[in-house]
Amino acid sequence: MNCLKSLFIKNFAFIFIFIFFSCDINEEKPNIIWIVCEDQSTDFFPFYGDNTAQLPNLEMLAKESVIYTNMHATTPVCAPARSSIITGMYPTSIGTHNMRAYSYDLGKKENQPQINIPIYSSRIAENIPPFTEYMRDQGYFCTNRDKMDYNFKISENTWDINCHQRMCSKDNLYDRAHWKSRNGNQPFFSVFNLPQTHESKIWQHNKNDILVDIKKISPPPYFPNDSVIIKDMAINYSNLTLMDEKVGEIINQLKKDELYEDSYIFFYSDHGGPFPRHKRAIYESGTKVPLLVKFPKSKNAGKIDNSLLSFVDFAPTVLNISGSKIPDYIQGKAFIGKNLPKKRNFLITTSDRFDGQIDRVRAIQNHDFKLIKNYNLNTSHNLDVKYRKNMPMMRRLNNLFEKNQLNNEQERWFLPREEYEFYDLKNDPYELKNIVENEKYAKLIEEFKFELNKWIKLTNDLGEKSEYDIIKESNIRN
């Protein structure tokens, strides 16, 4: 009897220790899911004030999340912005700032032949371990579905399974890029990229049913109240409803697998909206993106966080959540977890070559004001991007400008640029009134210029170099 009692006590102690440490491990290594849409600004979502589209799944998620109001893409276009996410570094520091330098489409032999830019991959970027490598070292199962273009050749160790639907027909890889493929209860980090709202869908879905009340649509002041503009905006809102259905499928699967409650769930967009003066524009419409984060047990649900955040912050944040050490070289700042660094006072966004259009723009902002420096003054912000001309709205705007039928606010985007632009973000959220010549702000503008120049030097901004020279240097691989 005493032997049985002793055995019971030992077994009970073992079970208690196992459960205790198992719980501790789960808390230290929570599951993390990213749901990423494409080409969307904060302006189009109910939880930021626009109720044109009903998005029940995202609205439910928002109620259980922290809503971040100041997350910015480092660059207002996908591949350079994505390079900052995977490395925690500014694209301008690692040679990935021009769109698109490297193509994940391995069958493509040339990039921008009209300006003699080949396909190339920055060795600076290649020598930086993607943050998921550190997570995998900690036992995480890491998957990425439907986006592979980071503007450089990523390490084969980046993901356990990495797949783009067009390129993953073999071995059922697309379906396997999912937390379900992990071993047992292995902690996981799973990214799902949803393509329904991409810029190209505006013209590809032109003949589809409109799923919102078109009468509710009111264009922002930099667009005319024109039927073509409103139609394209209606298509985008309709695409958002399609994307929301996919969000619901992911959330429902998490709940079915009993993973929803204890997981971190991020929802964000890869940069601003799909329209002209959104995507590829240094304005808030091009860089500010939605961000929801549902914490385990819906902790902090309903909180609004106005911190100045950048895509370089994603890598250190996820490493911090997962209990992984944040490498010293990472330029971003963790914004969730323990021992958080001091919040930034200034946020930087950058813009360089878009396809065949060479450009360079830098912007610095705080919560109230924004300074933009334009380096190419012989062009307008309306760069002649061939791809964008597929959009009816773009063709319509060009036509209205040529006929002198845009008002002063609407035509500014088409006119030659000034070297500096300065905006009062509180009173002029659409950045339409350049107050750089207002003496009232002279001292503040000089402070912004100083901080921008300091950042350019501190981060070794490669935008100062010709891209042709960068390609020739030994740290760039063709």
Image (spheres, rainbow, N blue to C red):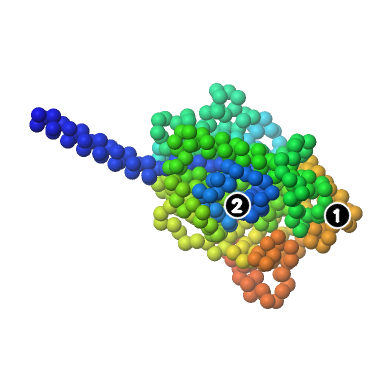
| Residue 41 in sight | no
Q: Amino acid at mark 1?
A: Phe
Nearest to the observer: residue 301 or residue 118 = 301
Q: Quadrant of the N terminus?
A: top left
Residue extending farthest to the left is 2
Nearest to the observer: residue 10 or residue 117 = 10
> Residue at coordinates 82% horizontally, 51% vertically from top-left?
226
Residue 71: % across, % down: 58, 54
Q: Amino acid at mark 2?
A: Phe
Residue 363: % across, % down: 65, 60
Q: Which residue is mark 1?
A: 401
Residue 257: % across, % down: 46, 33
121 is higher (above) or lower (below) than 414:
above
Q: Find numbered disc 2 in the image and state the secondary structure of the residue it sits on.
A: helix
Q: Find numbered disc 1 in the image and state the secondary structure of the residue it sits on.
A: helix
Residue 12: % across, % down: 21, 35
Tell me whether the residue at label 1 lies in contact with that at label 2, contact meaning CB atoms closer than 8 angstroms.
no
Residue extending farthest to the right is 403
Q: Which residue is mark 2?
A: 47
> Residue at coordinates 54% horizontally, 33% vertically from top-left?
162
Q: Which mark is residue 334?
A: none
Nearest to the observer: residue 10 or residue 109 = 10
Q: Quadrant of residue 196?
A: top right
